[in-house]
Amino acid sequence: MSENQKVIEIEVLRYHPEKDNEPYQQVFEVPFTDDMSVLQGVQYIKDYLDGSLSFRWSCRMAICGSCGMMINGIPSLSCQTFLRDYYPARVRVEALAHFPIERDLVIGLEGFIEKLESIQPYIIPKEARTLAQGEYLQTPEQLGAYEQFSSCINCLLCYAACPQFGLNPSFIGPAATALLHRYNVDSRDGGKAERMELINSEQGVFNCTAVGYCSEVCPKGVDPANAVNQNKTNSAADYFLRFLAPKGGAK
Amino acid sequence: MKPGLKRSNAPIFWALFGAGGMLSALLGPMLVFITGLAIPLGILLPADTMSYPKMLAFAQNFIGKSFILAIIALFLWHAAHRIFHSLHDIGIHAGTGAKLLCYGLAMLGTVLAAYALLVIGF
Amino acid sequence: MSKRRPYVRSMDGWWRKNPFFVEYMIHEGTALFVAAYAGVLLTGLWRLSQGEAAWSAWLTALRNPWYIGFHLVALAAIGYHTYTWFKIMPRTMPPVIVGGQRLPGWVITAGGLAAAAVASLGLLALVWGMAR
Ligand code: SF4
Ligand code: FES
């Protein structure tokens, strides 16, 4: 460590289920350089100060979606948030809001995985096709209808930004709805009616009060709020018109 | 995975909320200015703009009636829906009670407005 | 035996913890003024149905400084509702495709605000026209 090594304080919300009744703050002094992300700061803690600190990460390049944390209260990918932007102040890191804390910065993902499963995040072909019929063709416009929503990396920052999910964890929530929408508007897909059941349900889009923060924090420009709100319109149309033109999706 | 999904009845309230929100966003400020400031303070508009004969004629006219009813009712339904959600937001999960109170008051206001418009006649 | 004991944090005061949420609560709060103003109009309508004397009494009451004060605050609040309503429109509306391009959000917001301005001036002109 050289003389003019900068040192930043990182305050971490700790929680070890086997010994702590509730989470508590712990401050670490971390030497850093200007090119270090918050993730690298936390890694420094684990490597040199306290090996018991737990957190998730993998790619270090904002694509795997596993390193999300609350950084000074804002849902962020810790690998693309830099310590230099906080120095000389202290930076606070905490597990993503609205999810149960499994241990330190690690959240419980089961709820989300279940939701992801329930939306059937794969193309349900409109009609069976044989290999001989060749590939599906799509125009740039057809691609444009869903492309944005397919950029989701399941980082869950949007859920940590969504108070309605925090207040009611059964709400299907931003990313799952964005993904659901991504398949519903895909010209190759025929599963819309099935997926609309979820949209229309009490776990569905009407839990959203258009806070809009989810889209604000999304690192991939997915705009999940738009997917949710477009489906309010879809769902309302289905609600009022289902008796006129029954085409499934309603019960 | 298909748990017993229950269809939400929210679209009814959401549609009313949206209609009232749009109407109040488009006309709300100007209406407040006209009825609450310009007329009482006697600025900008002729003094007898809201005189009894003029307002009576307006409220007896079919278009005038519809306008008055739409403004009062949709403003109320818009507000009721927002307030209901805000109660939930600040941690008052009164559920059915809050729902009945919010939407019930909007319903009451709608009925009263319709009744007054009937009394005013055609 | 599993050592798992997931800790669920409280949501108490969530809306105070982020300026974005504070703004959200404020724009949701404009509904109180929309409701109160609808109440004022409903009272007026009721008085109108009771005849000329009742109506004139209501008009006089509107000149009360408390009423004026209320309407000033309501004007600000509902004006803010107008602004925020159109500000979130790009997020709440299906995409608008013009010439193969998705219309940018600010255009939708600006369009909405322009529509509100036109509608308001139209209303004023209409009231003006009917009054003369
Ligand atoms: S929608 Fe955006 S914020 Fe939400 S999980 Fe996907 S990438 Fe992350
Ligand atoms: S480590 Fe993969 S997104 Fe941050």
Image (cartoon, helix red, strand yellow):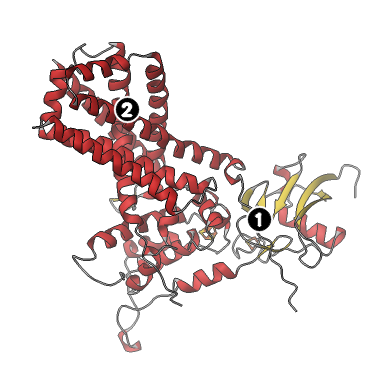
Looking at the image, is A248 positioned above or below residue B107? below
Dot 1 falls on which chain? C
> What residue sits 69% from the left and 49% below the top?
A82
Badge number at residue C9: 1
Q: Badge 2: how crowded within 10 Å, few (<14), some, or many (20+)?
A: some
Q: Residue B114, percent across and down?
A: 20, 38
User: Where residue A66 sits in the image (x, y, percent)?
Assistant: 63, 64
Task: Name the residue type under label 2.
Answer: Val
Indicate which disc residue A34 carries.
none
Is residue C114 at least partly visible in the picture? yes
User: Disc 1 marks which amino acid?
Assistant: Arg
Residue situated in front as seen by the camera: C33 or C106:
C33
The span from disc 1 to disc 2 (Cα, nearest Å) is: 42 Å
Callout 1: CB less than 8 Å from ligand 1: no
Query: Which secondary structure, mark 2?
Result: helix
Q: In this view, does C1 lie above or below B13?
A: below
x and y percentages locating residue C33 in the rendered image:
40, 31
Quarter occupied by residue C73 = top left
Q: Residue at x 72, y 71 (%)?
A: C4
Graded by Cα atoms within 10 Å as few (under 14), some (14 to 19) or many (20 or more), the crowding at tag 1 reads some
A245 left or right of A163?
left
Location of mark 2 (residue): C40
Left or right of A20? Residue A199 is left
Q: Earlier in the sequence, mark 1 or mark 2?
A: 1
Q: Which residue lies furthest to the left in this view?
A: B122
Looking at the rendered image, the quarter that the C terminus of chain C falls into is top left
Q: Kindly tell me whether residue A219 is visible in this rendering.
A: no
Q: Do the residues labelled 1 and 2 touch (CB within 8 Å)?
A: no
